[in-house]
Amino acid sequence: MQENFDKALEMLLHHEGGYVNHPRDPGGETNLGVTRNTYSSWVGRSIKDGEMKKLTPTDVAPIYKHEYWKRLKCDDLPPGLDFFCFDWGVNSGVSRSAKALQGIIGVEQDGGIGPQTLKALAEHNTAEVLIKMHDKRQGFYEGLKTFDTFGKGWTRRNKEALEQAQQLMS
């Protein structure tokens, strides 16, 4: 839902946290959930050392709006599901989040939310779809080889994202 972006971004940034550069994280240097490569691509130039540490929510909000929220058609999704798909898309890829939703509602899993996905989604109970999305997401996390390192945090995030999504529904 369109008016949910600002609230969704606030909740997402809580999950993403601040600056990290964990050696086992394949995303590498990250701040506010945005990787160095993503930020470099967004601004159209190489990022200088130390620049990632200075990112602010204002710097990253347009990236989240255009590269995740809009690509997942969150303005057209029901409240709650918009946030959950957005959060998972940021954490694990837009296509993965979209394909999970499509698989749950029984449409072609092409990774792009469009008219067919939205039409089929309208025939489903959002609360039930959210639970299934949570379960599918957890299964994805548990199948990753880095689950032993990051699994506790991913599991917490998935649980919190579900709870936050359910609150947005009411």
Image: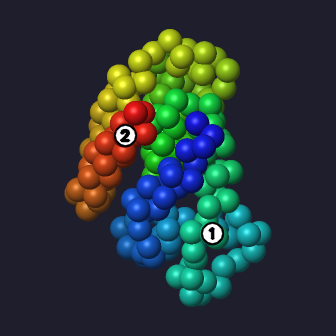
- At 50% from the left and 50% from the top, the residue drawn is 8
**Mark carried by residue 58:** 1
Q: Amino acid at mark 1?
A: Thr
Residue 141, can we see it?
A: no
Q: How many neighbours does mark 1 have within 10 angstroms: few (below 14), some (14-19), or many (20 or more)?
A: few
Q: With respect to residue 94, does 33 lie above or below?
A: below
The percent coordinates of residue 147 (x first, y second) are 27, 53
Element class at badge 1: helix
Give the color scheme: rainbow, by chain, secondary structure or one colour: rainbow
Distance CA(mark 1)–CA(mark 2): 25 Å
- At 64% from the left and 70% from the top, the residue drawn is 59
Quadrant holding the C terminus: top left
Q: Is residue 107 toward the left or the right of residue 21 in the image?
A: right
Q: With respect to residue 106, does 70 lie above or below?
A: below
Q: With respect to residue 14, does 3 lie above or below?
A: above
Q: Can you identify the residue that label 2 sits on?
A: 167
Q: With respect to residue 49, does 12 lie above or below?
A: above
86, 107: nearer the viewer: 86
The percent coordinates of residue 4 (x first, y second) are 55, 44
Q: Amino acid at mark 2?
A: Gln
167, 61: nearer the viewer: 167
